[in-house]
Image (cartoon, coloured by chain):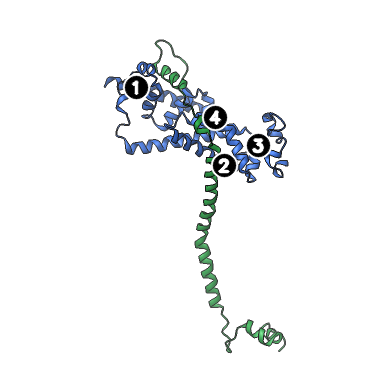
Chain colours: A green, B blue
């Protein structure tokens, strides 16, 4: 610290002083610095989307599997082997009324 | 706010918080640039870098050993700034916020370097500095090299506090604010680091 530095002079102070005066010149490095850094930022921004997509992959897979299982379990296996949709398409509204518990 | 609807270069001046930074009506304040950056304007962040890179380079050059390291370290500072820009509250100048980020990045750099060197070097000393006196180093313009050599034997905390205090000539209060250490802690660390550095240099003459 800069207090109580009496005689003899501390060689460390001379070393620090000389080092301060010998500061390097960074002008050459500063040239184009913004462009280089922005390139890294854009790279990071792009990779962050990819990393999010990669993180979401297991959830998307699990969701697809769950949807598949749900569809399999709730598959319409009526005696005629017809699905509700195809029955409605063929017979029209009366069939829909039948499924909805309306008047037959 | 005006800045959210116009690009930063179209904003005649920033909000009230920018009043200290208004140099002219045509120059947007740092806070306006921050808002524009957060709205996705990369050119605003380029302007922030252009304004503050001088100070960042100045501090980082005290820690990096070559041009490549210096460039990397400065880029790291601004990358961190970009990632954390949303945490900038705007109640202090952007310069102070960036100075804290710079010191934190330099500290992390020193710790990484220390770990890395620990694997590579047995004693961490280039042979040509073992017998070099302080006077001889200064006379031959190699004071900085000798100091770098001796400082490499200090811990990251010791090197950080000595560099900020003795080479950057910052006050104890400044260093406490930049590092998050208490002022007493800064003084104790600096005292011990200085004693250790003196011992390293004196011991090097005994060989």
Number of numbered discs on residues: 4
Real-space Cα distance between discs 2 and 3? 14 Å
Q: Do the dots labelled 2 and 4 sit on one chain?
A: yes
Of marks 3 and 4, the one in the foreground: 4
Q: Numbered disc 3: what chain?
A: B
Real-space Cα distance between discs 1 and 3? 46 Å
The residue labelled by disc 1 is B201
Residue drawn where x is 47% and y is 20% of the image: A21
Q: Numbered disc 2: what chain?
A: B
The residue labelled by disc 3 is B31
On the image, which quarter does residue A34 sit in?
Answer: top right
The residue labelled by disc 2 is B82
In the rendered view, would you say A80 is above or below A57? below
Of marks 1 and 4, the one in the foreground: 4
Nearest to N terminus: mark 1 or mark 4: 4
Q: Position of residue B116 (x, y in %)?
A: 37, 38
Real-space Cα distance between discs 2 and 4? 17 Å
In front here: B10 or B207? B10
The residue labelled by disc 4 is B55
């Amino acid at each position: 610290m800069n207090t109580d530095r009496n005689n003899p002079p501390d060689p460390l102070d001379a070393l620090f002083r000389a080092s301060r005066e010998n500061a390097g010149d960074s002008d050459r490095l500063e040239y184009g610095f913004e462009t280089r850094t922005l390139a890294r930022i854009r790279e990071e921004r792009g990779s962050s989307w990819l990393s999010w997509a990669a993180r979401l992959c297991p959830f998307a897979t699990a969701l697809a599997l769950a949807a598949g299982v749900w569809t399999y379990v709730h598959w319409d296996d009526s005696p005629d082997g017809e699905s509700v949709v195809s029955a409605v398409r063929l017979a029209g509204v009366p069939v829909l009324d039948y499924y909805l518990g309306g008047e037959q | 706010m005006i800045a959210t609807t116009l690009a930063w270069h179209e904003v005649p001046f920033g909000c009230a918080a920018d009043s200290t930074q208004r140099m002219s009506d045509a120059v947007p304040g740092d806070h306006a640039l921050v808002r524009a950056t957060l709205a996705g304007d990369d050119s605003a962040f380029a302007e922030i870098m252009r304004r503050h890179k001088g100070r960042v380079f100045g501090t980082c050059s005290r820690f990096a050993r070559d041009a490549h390291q210096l460039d990397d370290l400065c880029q790291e500072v601004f990358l961190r700034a970009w990632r954390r820009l949303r945490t900038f509250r705007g109640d202090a100048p952007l310069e102070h916020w960036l100075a804290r980020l710079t010191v934190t990045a330099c500290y992390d750099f020193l710790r990484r370097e220390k770990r890395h060197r620990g694997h590579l070097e047995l004693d961490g000393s280039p042979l040509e500095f073992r017998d070099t006196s302080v006077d001889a180093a200064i006379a031959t313009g190699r004071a900085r090299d000798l100091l770098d050599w001796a400082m490499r034997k200090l811990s990251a905390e010791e090197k950080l506090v000595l560099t900020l205090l003795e080479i950057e000539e910052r006050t104890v209060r400044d260093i406490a604010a930049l590092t998050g250490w208490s002022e007493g802690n800064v003084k104790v660390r600096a005292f011990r680091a200085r004693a250790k550095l003196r011992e390293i240099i004196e011991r090097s003459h005994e060989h």
